[in-house]
Image: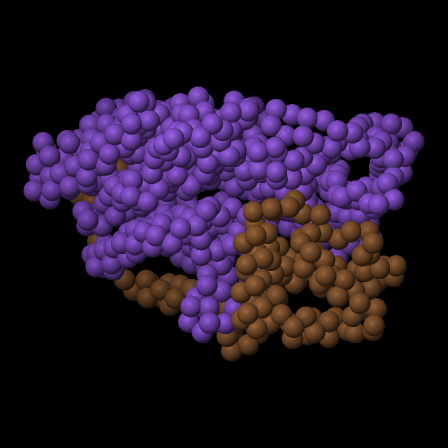
Chain colours: A purple, B brown
């Protein structure tokens, strides 16, 4: 019954979305407040209906209702409860429902908290959101319905893909989708502004919190996914330049650019047209990612079961939305005036440069991902574009950007003095140079690039610290004044510095693990010893063990350093009962920022076991840095001026009259 | 060739349903000469496993990947240079095995795009900067709105 209720709610949501797509838009056109006012309640209703559908699906998962085809295909009665919840989105249909749920969640947020938006802008934004919602609801109802029933109902389900039976599935997709789909709001704002033909600094201020929120969750989502792949896939890599990873990385790059250009637009009213274009581009890339993952045109560890009809359907959605938005852009962009002036050397100039490099990096990833597809379609020739290509092209684009980062925040708006800024960065530059030289000198045998890379990471870290120190007035104020200034700084200043700091931490981690990690493969019998990094591992042998829905062979290792026993690592090979599918559960020991990573291989005829051990110095910095970046995003989000909201046009007096110190 | 490819994809489809966690190089494959082994690892990480999802043969534990790894090592032991080994594998399996595609008429666009993009972007910006010096702007907000906005902007964040 609840299943039919969910199905019905989904259809009802389509109806409300269709109403929300049309009436508010017409209202904005003919200046009819009544019609425009339909948007908010319609958005909230759609959200509640889709929430109901989502709950219905969750209930059928939790109660293991195998009469629902989707549950039968992806669940099992013995599956631990947490995976019954997260398993809801561990498949194409369910994850699509989550995608839409998040989409309408954002629409509902705009509907509820957008009371300071001009009525016509709000109506247009919600209408555009509703177009996207309707398109994807059609898609789900016509090609990917999660509520299809089976008759007779099977007794037992086919279980969730074992690789997905992990806490990572509970966190990674929701975060990723919050980011991915969150950019839809920026897209809708951009399209609404184009429809309205009016865009100003206030627009940028309204869009910025949404961009920030989406960027923050996307950053966290990608980092989480990377760590998950690292420990679950069992070969110690943390980024594979897999097409699907690229699909989430491209919106991140474009979104990062958007975050920075919206800053210019908000403060200086410049770069309007470009910001609109970026907002459209970012969400278009999210849509492209959805297409790539679900259409089956790419082979990837992440790809869902393929069905050509689904691919064509999403392709149509893609063409309509991206094509439509860019056409509208081409028609209307000329009517928008370019806005504020600035000298090439200025904060605006630095942010333009940031945007140029970020979009080039994004284009590089895009071309690398799509080139093989296009080439095969055009000439029939099959080529592969893999990690070596991306490392070779993406790296050189990023290095100048990373070098330029510390200059940006220190430059003045409108017209900056590059030499004055350089002088302020002497300390940061000196420290990074010293670190780079030290690394090159002491790490014998490491590539020269390692020193340079770590130096760049330190440069970013020192640059962000310099930024905060200078804002506090270091050198020309007493400590107490500095302290008062420091706590008086706007949160966004801290947010930006934190994000750049985190980026530096990640860079250090990436370079260190690339240059200094060691891998060892050995065939060991129980009692055998392996040397890895500063540690000695003694293999204790294999012993069988069983979990709720799997059986496993556990290999235990005692880890000692300088003869002293310090820890035990357990690594396992599992076989999940329902699908007869093996997985590795890597054994990981974290010491400081470093990790010792142990994966079990096959048993050999002589009674030994193939064991793979990686020593990965500083590896946790990669994700730790990303977390700091997300925290920076959250801190910025709580900036006073974003919390209070954008200046309302009509009730401006109320917001402004509030005393500020 | 196409028959081979079709059968490879058939294997691929079957292989997907039994996707194995990667185990890659096993101890019995490793060469005694560490320099040769290092070269073998380097070469293998640039060759695509034809039956897997975007893995290099160095990362994959598919049978075919193992055969290729062994083949690479055999050629190295026989005294081939790195490029000879890669050439040999490409002659048997096609350009598709190269994770880093070679520069050719077909890939010239792929390789030049990042640089082109950057150059076009920079040129556009420089020209724009020159043009902008002579341009003038018109206010989009009404005077009152502009005043309100200024007031808010200056009162909220004089520090940044």
A51 relative to A401, above or below: above
Tell me which corner region of the image, top left, top right, bottom left or bottom right, holds residue B127.
bottom left
Q: Is residue A339 visible?
A: no
- Relative placement, left or right, of B40 versus A38 is right
Q: Residue at x 49, y 31 (%)?
A: A157
**B115 or A496, which lies in front?**
B115
- Place of residue A466 in the rendered image (x, y in percent of width and height, measured from the top left): 58, 40
**B153 or A52, which lies in front?**
A52
> Farthest residue in the front direction?
A152
- Relative placement, left or right, of A62 versus A18 is right
Tell me which corner region of the image, top left, top right, bottom left or bottom right, holds residue A555.
top right
**A371 or B85, which lies in front?**
B85
Number of disc labels = 0
Q: Is residue A229 visible?
A: yes
**A215 or A635, which lies in front?**
A215
- Place of residue A1 in the rendered image (x, y in percent of width and height, measured from the top left): 30, 22
B48 relative to A414, above or below: below
> Farthest residue in the bottom direction?
B105
Q: Which quadrant, please, contains the C terminus of chain A?
A: top left
Q: Residue at x 20, y 28 (%)?
A: A41
A2 relative to A226, above or below: above
- Place of residue A195 in the rendered image (x, y in percent of width and height, measured from the top left): 19, 49
- Place of residue A2 in the rendered image (x, y in percent of width and height, measured from the top left): 32, 23
Q: Residue at x 85, y 35 (%)?
A: A539
Tell me which corner region of the image, top left, top right, bottom left or bottom right, holds residue A571.
top right
Q: Residue at x 55, y 59 (%)?
A: B10
């Amino acid at each position: 019954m609840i299943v039919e209720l969910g199905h019905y709610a989904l259809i009802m949501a389509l109806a409300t979305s269709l109403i929300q797509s049309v009436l508010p838009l017409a209202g904005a056109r003919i200046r009819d407040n009544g019609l425009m006012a339909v948007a908010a309640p319609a958005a909230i209703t759609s959200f509640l209906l889709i929430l109901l559908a989502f709950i219905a699906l969750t209930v059928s998962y939790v109660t293991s209702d195998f009469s629902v085809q989707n549950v039968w295909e992806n669940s099992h009665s013995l599956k631990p409860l947490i995976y019954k919840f997260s398993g809801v989105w561990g498949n194409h249909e369910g994850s699509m429902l989550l995608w839409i749920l998040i989409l309408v969640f954002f629409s509902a947020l705009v509907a509820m908290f957008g009371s300071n938006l001009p009525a016509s802008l709000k109506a247009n934004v919600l209408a555009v959101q509703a177009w996207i919602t309707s398109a994807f609801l059609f898609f789900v109802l016509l090609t990917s319905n999660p509520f299809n029933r089976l008759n007779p109902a099977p007794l037992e389900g086919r279980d969730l893909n074992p690789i997905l039976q992990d806490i990572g599935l509970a966190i990674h997709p929701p975060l990723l989708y919050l980011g991915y789909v969150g950019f839809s709001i920026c897209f809708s704002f951009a399209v609404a502004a184009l429809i309205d033909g009016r865009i100003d600094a206030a627009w940028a201020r309204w869009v910025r919190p949404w961009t920030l929120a989406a960027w923050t969750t996307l950053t966290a989502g990608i980092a989480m996914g990377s760590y998950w792949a690292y420990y679950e896939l069992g070969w110690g890599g943390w980024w594979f330049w897999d097409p699907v990873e690229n699909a989430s990385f491209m919106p991140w790059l474009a979104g990062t650019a958007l975050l920075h250009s919206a800053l210019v637009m908000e403060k200086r009213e410049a770069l309007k047209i470009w910001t609109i274009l970026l907002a459209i581009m970012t969400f278009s890339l999210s849509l492209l990612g959805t297409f790539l993952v679900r259409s089956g045109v790419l082979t990837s560890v992440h790809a869902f079961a393929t069905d050509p009809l689904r691919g064509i359907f999403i392709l149509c959605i893609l063409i309509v939305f991206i094509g439509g938005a860019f056409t509208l852009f081409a028609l209307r962009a000329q009517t928008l005036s370019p806005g504020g002036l600035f000298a090439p050397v200025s904060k605006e100039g630095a942010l333009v440069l940031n945007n140029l490099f970020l979009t080039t990096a994004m284009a590089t990833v895009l071309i690398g991902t799509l080139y093989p597809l296009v080439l095969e379609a055009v000439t029939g020739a099959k080529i592969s574009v893999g990690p070596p290509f991306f490392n070779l092209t993406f790296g050189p684009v990023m290095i100048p950007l990373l070098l330029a980062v510390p200059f940006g925040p220190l430059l003045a708006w409108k017209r900056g003095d590059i030499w004055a800024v350089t002088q302020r960065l002497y300390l940061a530059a000196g420290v990074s140079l010293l670190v780079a030289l030290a690394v090159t000198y002491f790490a014998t045998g490491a590539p020269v690039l390692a020193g340079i890379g770590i130096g760049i990471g330190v440069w970013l870290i020192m640059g962000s610290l310099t930024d905060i120190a200078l804002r506090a007035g270091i050198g020309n104020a007493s400590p107490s004044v500095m302290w008062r200034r420091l706590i008086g700084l706007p949160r966004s200043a801290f947010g930006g510095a934190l994000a750049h700091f985190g980026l530096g931490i990640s860079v250090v981690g990436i370079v260190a693990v690339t240059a200094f990690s060691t891998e060892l493969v050995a065939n060991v019998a129980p009692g055998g010893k392996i040397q890895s990094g500063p540690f000695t591992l003694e293999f204790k042998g294999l012993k069988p063990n069983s979990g709720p829905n799997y059986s496993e062979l556990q290999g235990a290792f005692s880890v000692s350093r300088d003869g002293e026993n310090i820890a035990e690592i357990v690594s396992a090979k599992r076989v999940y009962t329902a699908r007869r599918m093996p997985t590795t559960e890597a054994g990981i020991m974290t010491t400081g920022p470093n990790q010792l990573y142990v994966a079990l291989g096959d048993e050999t005829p002589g009674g030994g076991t193939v064991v793979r051990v990686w020593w990965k110095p500083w590896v946790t910095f990669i994700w730790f840095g990303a977390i700091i970046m997300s925290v920076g995003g959250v801190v910025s989000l709580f900036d006073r001026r974003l919390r209070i909201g954008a200046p309302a046009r009509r009730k401006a007096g109320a917001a402004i009259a509030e005393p500020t110190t | 060739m196409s028959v081979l490819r079709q059968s490879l994809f058939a294997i691929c489809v079957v292989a997907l349903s039994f996707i194995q966690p990667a185990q890659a190089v096993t101890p019995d494959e490793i060469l005694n000469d560490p320099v040769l082994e290092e070269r073998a690892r380097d070469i293998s990480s640039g060759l695509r496993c034809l039956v897997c999802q975007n893995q290099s043969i160095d990362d994959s534990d598919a049978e075919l990947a193992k055969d290729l790894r062994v083949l690479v090592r055999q050629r190295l032991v026989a005294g081939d240079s790195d490029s000879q080994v890669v050439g040999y594998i490409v002659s048997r399996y096609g350009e598709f095995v190269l994770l880093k595609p070679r520069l050719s008429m077909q890939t010239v666009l792929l390789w030049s795009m990042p640089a082109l993009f950057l150059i076009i972007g920079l040129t556009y910006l420089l020209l724009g900067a020159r043009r902008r010096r002579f341009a003038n702007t018109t206010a989009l907000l009404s005077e009152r709105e502009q005043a309100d906005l200024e007031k808010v902007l200056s009162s909220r964040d004089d520090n940044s």
